[in-house]
Amino acid sequence: MFSMPIIYALIGGYLLGSIPFGLLIARASGQGDIRKIGSGNIGATNVLRTGRKDIAFITLLLDAGKAGVAALLFNHFFGSPIGLFAGAAALIGHCFPVWLKFKGGKGVATFFGGLLATAWPIGLIAGAIWLACAFITRISSLSALAAAGSAPLIALMMGYVNIAMMAAVMAVIIYIRHAENIGRILQGTESRIGKKD
């Protein structure tokens, strides 16, 4: 059975993660509903398609902070590993926000934010994997999948069992949200960084 702190962490993390910062910031800056442009997602990548790099960067920071703040906050009050439940729940909230009929972002920024806040060495290694993959393949989604998939293994090799479990949950969610991207990657039609289709 789940203890009350875990239940609090799951609910609190999910609610924090489900705040659609990209949508709110885009609307507040006069860009309208970003769900009606580009990929239709609420994350920083789609906000960037408005042409506003400033609000895209702010969205990136806020989305990354969701899991990080949730994990650190609940870890402070309830200790480890309660904060890890909150971090994973924040990613779920970002990807499947109840306010938007469970249609949210892809979760990549939130994933890295959670890792950097709870185990920064693993977050940095995962980030390096993203960069290396992006440099070689120039496919952002593939780079995200590589980083997410490797993070749990990296955590296990470094002896962070609890972090590995959180990273595994987050990786599964990211793979689910990237299902269409995976299909395009297998078909060889996925868009590449810096190249307009």
Image (spheres, grey):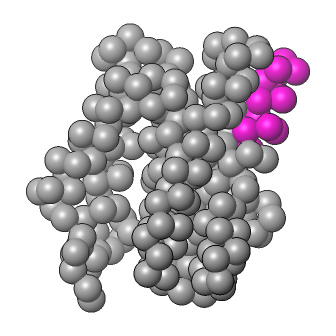
Toward the left, the furthest residue is: 136
Q: Residue at x 53, y 58 (%)?
A: 58
- Look at the image and tell me whether residue 186 can be seen: no
Q: Residue at x 52, y 50 (%)?
A: 61
Q: Nearer the viewer, residue 30 or 183?
A: 30
For the question of whether residue 143 can be seen, the reply is yes
Q: For the point 24% across and 42% down, which residue is it?
A: 129
In x, y percent, where is residue 38? 48, 83
- Please report the residue visible at 66 percent of the width from the left and 61 percent of the height from the top: 21
As drawn, 87 above or below 41: above
From the image, which quarter does the C terminus lie in?
bottom left
The percent position of residue 117, horizontal first and vertical second, equals 51, 29
Say which quadrant the N terminus sits in. top right
| Position above or below: 85 against 107 | above
By secondary structure, the bulk of the magenta-drawn segment is best described as helix
Left or right of 50: which side holds 92? right
* Residue 154, image quadrant: top left
Q: How many marks?
A: 0
Q: Percent from the top left, x then y, of residue 127?
A: 31, 41
Give yes or no for residue 93 being in the magenta stretch.
no
Quarter residue 155 falls in: top left
Which stretch did the figure color magenta?
1-14
Residue situated furthest right in the rendering: 4
Residue 32 falls in image quadrant: bottom right
| Left or right position of 53 against 157 | right
**Image spot of residue 166 (x, y percent):** 54, 30
| Residue 50 horizontal side relative to residue 26, left or right | left
